[in-house]
Image: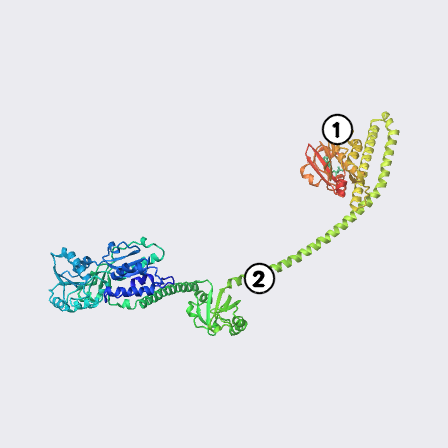
Amino acid sequence: MKGIESILNTGGKDNPIVHVEYMDTKNFNKSELFPILTELYRNKYSNRQPKVIITSDDYALDFMLEHRDALFPGVPVVFCGANNFKDARLNGQTGYTGVVEAIDMFHTVRIALMLHPDAKHLVAVADTTRSGLINRQAFLSMIEEFKGQYSIIDLHDWTAEELAQELKILPKDSVIFNLSFFRDNLDTLFTAVQGNQFIKEHSPYPVYSFWDFSLGTGVVGGMLVSGVLQGQEAGEMALKILKGTPVKDVPIVRESPNMYMFDHLALVEAGIDTARLPENSLVINKPQSFYDNYKREIYFLAGTLGCLIILIIIMAANILQRRKAQAELMSIFHNTQAGILHLKGGRIVYRANQRMADILGYDTPSELHGKNVKDFHIDVTHYTQFGKDFYDTLVSSQSVTTEYQLKRKDGTPVWVALSGKAMDQVHPPNLNSGVVWIIQDISERKQAEEDLEALNRELESKVQIRTLELKEQADELEAVNRRLLKFDELKSAFLNTVSHDLRTPLTSIRGFVRLIQRDFDKTFSCNLGGCDRKTKKIGNRITANLNILVEESNRLTRLINDFLDLSKIESGGMQWRDQSLNLGTTISKIAHLLAIHFQANKDIQLRVDVPETLPTIHADPDRIIQILDNLVGNASKFTEKGYISIRAFASSPKKVVVEVKDTGIGIPEEELPHIFDKFHQVETDDTLRDTIKGTGLGLAICKEIVDHYKGEMWVTSEANKGSTFAFSLPTEAADQ
Ligand code: ADP
């Protein structure tokens, strides 16, 4: 049942319902029992037929073979514990399958002989029941092959008393095999337990058997028929059928599922070491080891211990790590380039590093330990004031940062940058439990700052002195400038007046000189032919001197005119009669007049390249003509041969350019930057230049006029090749 239940009754909700019927065939006669059971089962199951029937042992199978069709028609039967089953036993009936039970005498005898190597006598005990007879027969034929080595003692056909006698006189080194012991010749019944116990009571020799139900009754063991294995096998088959496999597809298991089984108590009694048992043997009554008894507790403890060990390892690793970190921290603490002061309990040094000792002029940090910080302040007043200044900040968990002067061991002061904070994490922190100060020596920086400040002060005073000096100089210069401007004004006014005043007498002088010249020519020159040489010579000299007078007075007139023009432009007194002007037509109109400047010199050509369609400008035509007259006049003065060209073009829609080019003597490069300065004349040993008497104001006037119209004027020149004077003026379009 144990075997069957282990398969069918696993505790799940889908387990089939199992009804168990005990037939009790060992205690009753089959012929009496079967009709009663038939009646009973008919009553019980006629209305609720089972799905599958499992029979255990031969009588149950016999009952089904006889009555199944009547009681449980068509219900599949799974048998187990059917001894030496042959298909013929089914007698053609279908719907039967199961597991065969066959005792294994050979393996049982062989293991008995292995475990008792000294055995000499094999004793067979069998009763006269049907199985007793069958088993004895089978045993005797199987034992044939051992016959030569062992004596066979065959105990059968006995009363209990006779058997007891026989057992008692068994020879030494006997091994007993209980083949069947349920009834003696006096029909005394024995259970399996009683049978085995009987043998044990009357014989000291080991007893072997073939069924697992014999175990625990004093039998050593053997290759036993296992009711549990039979039941399990039958259970599996029944389950298959319940799940829908047709019974014909569940084949009969013909190999009896036997196994080596032993009783530890009997093994000990027989002096057999369990190590000699075959592998996978089942041993019952094994003494429970401490491990067996406290398996759960041991696992629990081992688990706990394992956890503890892991915990210890982790903690050890942690401790090592912390130690390493601590060592690293201490190394940082001692080697850091900032002084660290750890104060505790009322401003007393608890710990300090080497740098701190260095800053304060002590040899080692331990010299500082236990000292009151009062020793590091310049005096008690500073010490008290420091406490007052920073106590509140520290108590409010904030950090103090300041620059402060401490006192070194030798009494000298040292500037430091302090940064301190309470160590206590609670709020407000208890300062007695620790305040850490980080201290940097800043005396060098302080010194540098002081030096810099002194330098700054010095520099500032120097700058002040210099500024005063410069101001004085500037004032002086300004005064000079004012004086100069005044002089300039005076000079201009003077020259203006003088020029005006000179013009009238100069006009008279020129008029009278011309009159004298004419009168002289008319009255004396024609008669000079009859005069002596001396008179002739004097007459010619008078004529030449009169010519010089005319020329010089002309030059003076030009100078005055030029000067007055320039003064007018500069003083703003010039009258500008501006109008829309086409430079092309203007230049074309006056070109022949300009050519008068060099009409006496046939070696000079005039070239005019002026398009009629130039953009108009807004200017006074007289002033433009004045510029052109000046430039062409200059060109003709300094050109002996070649050409003088006048070109005009629009360099852009906003600008018109006029160029006057000559092939004359040119201007030395170093003179060019000053060429437009007033009264500037190029001084060279050039004979041509020397003969020409100019005023040095012409170009300056041109430049003033061009400037007035917001134009530009420039010159390019190459010595002995010629010069090009050019000016540009904005067009009317650009002006708007
Ligand atoms: P000036 O009345 O002396 O000609 P300008 O101001 O007109 O005064 O000219 C200044 C000087 O520039 C002249 O004296 C002359 O030396 C030089 N100069 C002007 N134009 C030319 C030129 N086309 N070729 C060479 N030299 C020139």
Give percent across and percent down for residue 458: 60, 60
Q: Secondary structure at mark 1?
A: strand
Is residue 642 placed above or below 682 in the rendered structure? above
Please state the horizontal and vertical placement of residue 152, each as a whole percent of the image: 12, 60
Which residue does the image show at 50% across and 68% down from the upper left? 420
Q: Residues within 10 Å of mark 2 (few under 14, many from 20)?
A: few
Q: Does 289 appear above or below 586?
A: below
Q: Which residue is mark 2?
A: 453
User: What is the x, y in percent for residue 431?
Assistant: 49, 73
Q: Is residue 569 left or right of residue 207?
A: right
Question: What is the three-letter code of the residue carrying label 2?
Answer: Glu
Pointer 1: residues within 10 angstroms few (<14), some, or many (20+)? some
Q: Which residue is mark 1?
A: 605
Left or right: 226 as drawn, with respect to 142: right
Q: Quadrant of the N terminus?
A: bottom left
Image height of 356 relative to 468, above or below: below
Q: Position of residue 408 (x, y in %)?
A: 47, 68
Q: Is residue 42 visible?
A: yes
Location of ligand 1 given as a quarter of the image? top right
Side (left or right) of 733 relative to 510: left
Instruction: Kindly check if marks 2 and 1 are in contact, taking CB atoms under 8 A apart as contact.
Output: no
